[in-house]
Image (cartoon, rainbow, N blue to C red):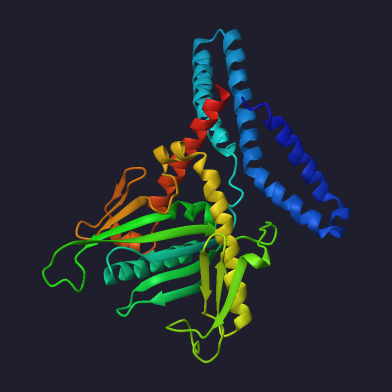
Amino acid sequence: MFEKLKDVQLRYEDITRELASPDIASDPDRLKKLMKEQSDLTPLVDKYTEYVKNQKDMSDALSMMDGETDPEMKEMLRDEFQKAKEKDAKLSEELRILLIPKDPDDDRNVIFEIRAGAGGDEAALFAAEIYRMYIHYAERKGWKSETLDFEESGIGGMKYVNFMIRGTGAYARLKYEGGVHRVQRVPATESAGRIHTSTITVAVMPEVSDDIQIDIPPEDVRIDITRASGNGGQGVNTTDSAVRLTHIPTGIVIYSQTERSQLQNKNKAWALLRSKLYDLEKQKRHDEEADLRRSMVGTGDRSEKIRTYNFPQGRVTDHRIKLTLYNLDDVMNGDLDEVIDPLITADQEAKLLKMNQQEM
């Protein structure tokens, strides 16, 4: 089942030898590439080494048991064999998970776009709370966050907010957050005490670095320079520094105004446009696996209702995997691992199922 892992182990040994060579220091690009490849292979090679050792332990116990005449010693060997057999099943499953093709975007930073949907002011308030939830989660993980653009509502909510989270593995954990988030509660403005339902949409995109080629012909983008408006940062109304990019083929509009400098706003706008176009292409690829993804963790479509936050009951429900937790306060304060970990597990199960079907 794991025959090809022998080649992986040999490749790992070749990398290790090359990294130990004094000549590698003269080629920084090669050094960086090899260190990244070694880092990616290490968990797989370590697990395979453990698997091979356990296979030997199991074989040794079985052969010794066949030639043993002492009943007590034979029982001890039988016990060792059984333990190794149970461990073999566990290691085999762990290896299969490690063999799942890695999403090349998993190590990238994340760009979020949160927009208030149905519910007016209450939806805008909820958008601001979900924004803070992700910021708190980033802080718990030791990641950095940066607000790219936003528009506030009059009562402290957010009509929309774009922000980036920077950190190793950020996209790997947060990519499941895209979709419609629904809140059920009594709004502060509701005098009759009735529970209202409001929604927001969350888009999650990997940051597109310079190593990814995104072809954007200049004639496809209209650039407008305007004076910033609203609460976008200190001194935003003093100069014509806001930048609006309109991607004509798709109709995507990017507006950036949080920086004093027109150049900085333009750079942010272009970075967001590149990520959005890359995300569109990624969504097309996901559509090919839509049936399988829908059954496990949803399609990733932004119109899909993925989660409900019920404040009267203190309940969070993720509809894709039928997960219900009664720790809403913790979740809103950024304790998201109890929600995200089961989503990762479900996604792995879907991919393992696909691998098994391909092997049949």
Residue at (55% x, 32% y) in the render: 91
The part of the image, by quadrant, that contains residue 159 is bottom left
Q: Is residue 156 visible?
A: yes
Q: Residue furthest bottom?
A: 238
Q: Is residue 186 left or right of residue 108?
A: left
Q: Is residue 145 visible?
A: no
Q: From the image, which quarter does the C terminus lie in?
A: top right
- Closer to the camera, 40 or 184? 184
Residue 231 x/y as whole percent: 43, 83
Q: Residue furthest left?
A: 192
Residue at (59% x, 54% y) in the render: 107
Give the answer, above or below, for where 212 lies relative to 142.
above
- Closer to the camera, 44 or 253? 253
Give the answer, above or below, for where 222 lies relative to 317.
below
Give the answer, above or below, for where 239 lies relative to 252.
below
Residue 136 x/y as whole percent: 42, 66
- Closer to the camera, 239 or 58? 239
The part of the image, by quadrant, that contains residue 240 is bottom right
Residue 353 x/y as whole percent: 49, 31
- Closer to the camera, 10 or 165? 165
Q: From the image, which quarter does the N terminus lie in?
A: top right
Residue at (56% x, 50% y) in the render: 282
Q: Is residue 27 left or right of residue 259?
A: right
Looking at the image, how many numbered discs can be counted on the residues?
A: 0
Residue 64 x/y as whole percent: 61, 14
Q: Is residue 224 left or right of residue 126?
A: right
